[in-house]
Amino acid sequence: MTLMTLTRRQCLTAASAGVLAAGFGTTREARAAETIRQGYQTNIWGMPTYYLMKSGYLERHGLAVEQYPVPSGNLTMQQMVARQVDVGTYAAQSFIIGNAKGGLVAIALIEHVGKTARITARKDLNITKVEQLRGLKIANQTGSSVGNVFVDVIAPQHGLKKGDYQEVRMDVNNMVAALAAKTVDAMVNVEPYNVIAVAEGIGTDLMDFSSVDPMPVFMAATPDLVAQKPDVVVAYLKAWLDAAKDFKNNPKKVADVIYSFYTGKGYNMSLDTFSQALSRVEVDPGFPTDLVPYMQQQAEILMQSKLINAVPDWRKALRPDFMERARSGA
């Protein structure tokens, strides 16, 4: 398996005027395309966004996109706080930190990914329980939502406090190679890296996060974009609603597009193995009405860990009105 270095910026061009004239029905056809700077993580959480960018739906709604791929969503969050990126996906924990640091706004809940976040140990160690990781080296992307949930919630539930194991800070896309080289004993990672490790006989899954945290992944926007270009936000979410139909009605098309991303980066896995990883992502763009209790709980955990100083004002941080407009066709 070859782990390739990902480019930080790849630009997609807007659809030509001829394509727009071909009857793709957008309310923004008469205008120049608005460019969105799209951040996304190159693990499985970011692949619905990758599909959106490849699907053509953004162009049909009068939008062009610049891609900013990074290994995990907390890096996208940091780019957004620095106003280098307009929109990006990450789990609740990273979003709350981003809101505290840069006023970032949630415009939609894109997916639930608790089944994709997993703890995987080296197969040769014959480990079957999280408790058995005491004293071992665990690869973890410090500061990521998955990393925070492991350190703050899952490890303590299994009797492991900080200092009971050696945390090896590492990008998620380097962990499988480290596991194979036996420089770490286990990894806290997300798909497709866990399924690759298992399929290649390198690792054994100990647990996924779904029983602890469903891990909703938000599409967040900078407050600048929300305040200055609300119509662009609505058009963007309309494209998401179109893409969601493909996840529901044409999963093979979706899998083929996303599979090509990983094979193009040098990852060696079968389409069946990849499809297993992708099936653990529950894509359903919307804005559930019962988010605040969950978000409040996560914010309080982050406060206890001294990662934020105050609980966000949810009326400002969570903006369901944009999705409501997108669904209504406004």
Image: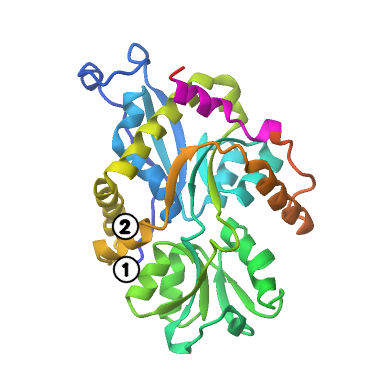
Residue 144 seen in the figure: no
Query: Label 1 belongs to which residue?
Result: 2
Main SS, magenta residues? helix
Dot 2 falls on a residue whose secondary structure is helix
**Which three-letter amino acid code belongs to the residue tagged 1?**
Thr
- Residue 320 vs residue 312, the one in the foreground: 320
Give the magenta range.
315-328
> Gap in Å between the C-alphas at discs 2 and 1?
11 Å
Residue 61: x and y in percent read 36, 23
Using the image, determine if residue 34 lies above or below residue 190.
above
Question: In which quarter of the view is residue 243 placed?
Answer: top left
* Direction from residue 192 to residue 155 in the image, left or right: right
Query: Label 2 belongs to which residue?
Result: 262
Using the image, determine if residue 302 lies above or below residue 290.
below
For the point 51% across and 44% down, which residue is it?
89
The colour scheme used here is: rainbow
Question: In which quarter of the view is residue 287 placed?
Answer: top right
Residue 136: x and y in percent read 59, 83
First in sequence: mark 2 vs mark 1: 1
**Which three-letter amino acid code belongs to the residue tagged 2?**
Tyr
